[in-house]
Image: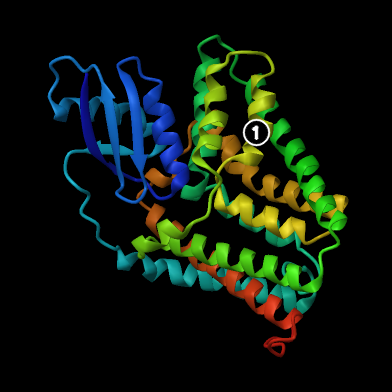
């Protein structure tokens, strides 16, 4: 048995830790895996015969590459691609301008101080589906697709997975909303939860910009053991596995999902809470469906840096908007905008 420590390229959040460990632990030669988001590395123990560390890193990278990660003996030389902002800023500004115009015209109601917004939930879901924080869900989708493709059943399991995911977000989101009503949340608690949503969105936005390494350590997630248990479902080749796996994604360590779950708690309504989480899941559906049937990998595109930075700026905008709305609702500051 040998133990090697490799640097992981492409790791962005704690979800990446879960999927890296899960994928490598499935290999016959590997007996133990421990990844670290703090050090951006992974410690692998196994029987690799007389292979040199470089060859081991290359073989393990081949397995991780479909999920967006590679391993090396050398630490990744990190450099910020500031030129990406030349396109990212105009794209984000254009999106925000459309948002403001639609708000001004009263055609949509994306963000309000009085009630949660389905439009905002859908847009955040759309961004989340291509962000690094959804890597663990994308990895689960890819693994399920590959696992069932071996038996020639490519479509049905994927359809069941996505239908189950939408249904679970609707039902479990409703339960969270009803839970908020059961506790009869006062204005102080609602303000604290709204503030938490704003802070989580700001952290997620900063992570998407990929210019502040320290922001990765701030991102809240559920315990990694939950993510590992859910992603482990892909190895159970059973008729009900896609249904169970789809429903279990509600509990995966994704900061975007958790921010919406906190948001849902403030609704105090089963129906509103369920629809908020359903709309969020609906926003993630297009990209996750493409992952299921075409192995889409936006993170591997040469334009990914521009997209993620533009998405990060938009998420930061939503975070600031939520923060301002929470402060206005608590009468801490006067309204800054008239829409």
Q: Is residue 162 above or below residue 279?
A: above
- Check disc 1: other Cα within 10 Å, few if <14, some if 14-19, many if 20+: many
As drawn, the residue found furthest toward the front would be 183
**In percent of the image, x 57 and y 16: which residue is there?**
236
Q: Nearer the viewer, residue 89 or 184?
A: 184
With 154 as the anchor, is 42 left or right in this view? left
Q: Nearer the viewer, residue 293 or 27?
A: 27
Residue 208 visible here: no
Q: Nearer the viewer, residue 40 or 315?
A: 40
In which quarter of the view is residue 307 placed? Answer: bottom left
Disc 1, SS: helix
Task: Tell me the residue at 40%/50% (across/down).
Answer: 12
Q: Position of residue 156 (x, y in %)?
A: 67, 20
Is 101 situated above or below 161?
below
What quarter of the picture does the N terminus occupy?
A: top left
Is the residue 282 above or below the residue 110 in the image? above
Please indicate, yes or no, whether residue 130 appears anywhere in the rendered image: yes
Residue at x 36% of width, y 27% of height:
24
Asked which quadrant contains residue 268, the reply is bottom right
**24 relative to 271 in the view: left or right:** left
Q: Where's residue 32, x and y in %?
A: 34, 25
Question: Which residue is tagged 1?
Answer: 248
Residue for point 70% across, 45% down: 282
Q: Position of residue 163 (x, y in %)?
A: 72, 32
For this orientation, the residue located farthest to the bottom is 334
Q: Position of residue 318 (x, y in %)?
A: 61, 68
Quarter of the image with the C terminus in it: bottom right
Q: Is residue 272 left or right of residue 27?
A: right
């Amino acid at each position: 048995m040998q133990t090697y420590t490799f640097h992981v390229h492409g790791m962005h959040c704690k979800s990446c830790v879960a999927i890296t460990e899960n994928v490598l632990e499935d290999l016959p030669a590997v007996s133990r895996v421990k990844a670290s988001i703090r050090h951006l590395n992974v410690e692998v123990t196994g029987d690799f015969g007389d292979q040199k560390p470089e060859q081991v890193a290359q073989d393990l990278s081949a397995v991780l590459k479909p999920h967006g990660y590679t391993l090396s003996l050398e630490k990744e030389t990190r450099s910020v691609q500031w030129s990406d902002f030349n396109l990212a800023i105009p794209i984000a500004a254009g999106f925000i301008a459309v948002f403001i115009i639609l708000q001004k015209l009263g055609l949509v109601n994306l963000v309000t101080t009085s009630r949660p917004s389905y439009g905002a939930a859908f847009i955040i879901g759309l961004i989340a589906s291509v962000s690094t924080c959804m890597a663990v869900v994308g990895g689960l989708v890819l693994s399920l697709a590959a696992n069932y493709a071996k038996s020639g059943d490519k479509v049905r399991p994927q359809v069941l997975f996505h239908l189950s995911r939408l249904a679970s977000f609707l039902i479990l989101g409703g339960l969270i909303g009803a839970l908020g009503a059961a506790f009869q949340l006062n204005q102080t608690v609602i303000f604290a939860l709204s503030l938490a949503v704003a802070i989580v969105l700001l952290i997620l936005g900063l992570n998407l910009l990929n210019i502040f390494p320290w922001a990765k350590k701030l991102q809240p997630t559920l315990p990694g053991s939950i993510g590992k248990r859910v992603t482990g479902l892909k190895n159970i080749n059973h008729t009900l596995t896609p249904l169970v796996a789809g429903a279990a994604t509600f509990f995966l360590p994704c900061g975007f999902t958790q921010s919406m779950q906190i948001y849902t708690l403030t609704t105090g309504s089963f129906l509103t809470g369920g629809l908020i989480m359903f709309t969020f899941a609906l926003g993630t559906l297009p990209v996750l469906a493409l992952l299921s049937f075409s192995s889409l990998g936006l993170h591997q595109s040469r334009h990914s840096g521009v997209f993620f930075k533009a998405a990060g700026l938009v998420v930061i905008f939503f975070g600031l908007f939520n923060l301002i709305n929470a402060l206005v609702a608590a009468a801490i500051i006067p309204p800054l905008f008239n829409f």
